[in-house]
Image (tube, rainbow, N blue to C red):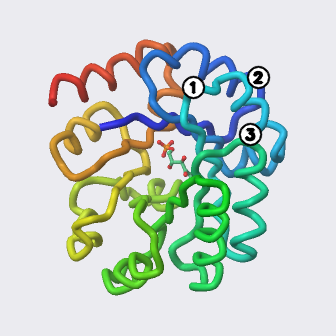
Amino acid sequence: MKIQLALDRLPKEDCFRLVGETADFIDLIEIGTGVIKEYGMDIVREMKQRHPGKLLLADMKTCDAGKSEASQAFSAGADIVTVMGFAGNATVSGALEAAVQFGKTVMVDLLEVREPERVKELSGLGVDLFCIHIGKDSQEQGRAAGTASLDLLADVPSARIAVAGGLNKEAVKGLAGSRVEIAIVGSAITGSQNPKEAARHIRQVIDAAQ
Ligand SMILES: O=C(CO)[C@H](O)[C@H](O)COP(=O)(O)O
């Protein structure tokens, strides 16, 4: 299982510092939605320039203008962009079209998607990478991402799966050995007193489970 470090609600300098400290233990870097709203495509561009060997995800959370927004992020150096699963099919298809043009990838964020039928429909459009996501506001109401929510993808055995939403070391351990390909971890690393050690521990948990 891969680790995607989510950089959310952070100043630019902290984003670069955190990636510098944890780079040995993470596989993907995510520029979070709020960080993109603050710094735009410049931070996507700069992160790719500084870390060309890491896969870079721009968490655009696109819900309209799919082709245009995906192209914007791919042009800036993103390898993966996110599009919301509740977006219209034309938006998802537009983003997928851009991904083909740039030779890159779309991740569909299933935040608030509850119907397996919708996941099958998205798969039919050509989506192969999905993110099961419990958002910040839901987390504050006591929900957390876990293996139970994998049921949403039970009918799409070919789907590649990422999981996000308050994952910590214990939750990542619970995902190890499941279908999940990418554990998206934000605050458990970025909010830790020692981000490098936090990332190292999560990496160890994953390696030990393989
Ligand atoms: O997409 C996100 C928020 O919308 C976050 O990147 C994702 O939830 C991971 O962060 P955390 O581990 O802090 O929940």
Q: Mark 3 or 1, which is nearer the eye?
A: 1
User: Rounded to the nearest whole Å, what is the CA distance between mark 2 and mark 3?
Assistant: 13 Å
User: Rounded to the nearest whole Å, what is the CA distance between mark 3 and mark 1?
Assistant: 14 Å
Q: Is residue 144 above or below residue 170?
A: below
SS class, disc 1: loop
The part of the image, by quadrant, that contains residue 95 is bottom right
Q: Is mark 1 within 8 Å of ligand 1?
A: no
Residue 163: give x, y in percent of width and height: 37, 52
Q: Locate the N terminus by quadrant.
A: top left
Residue at 40%, 34% in the rendered image: 3
Query: Is 26 left, or right, of 179 in this rendering?
Result: right
SS class, disc 2: helix
Residue at 33%, 86% in the rendered image: 117
- Circle 1 packing at 10 Å, graded few (<14), some (14-19), many (20+), is few
Query: Is 203 left, or right, of 45 in this rendering?
Result: left
Q: Mark 1 or 2, which is nearer the eye?
A: 1
Residue type at the position of mark 3: Val
SS class, disc 3: helix
- Circle 2 packing at 10 Å, graded few (<14), some (14-19), many (20+), is few
- Circle 3 packing at 10 Å, graded few (<14), some (14-19), many (20+), is many
Query: Is 210 left, or right, of 41 in this rendering?
Result: left
**Which mark, by number, is residue 53?**
1
What residue is disc 3 on?
44
What residue is disc 2 on?
13
Residue type at the position of mark 2: Glu
Residue type at the position of mark 1: Gly
First reached walking from the N terminus: tag 1 or tag 2? 2
Q: Nearer the viewer, residue 22 or 155?
A: 155
First reached walking from the N terminus: tag 2 or tag 3? 2
Residue 146: give x, y in percent of width and height: 27, 53
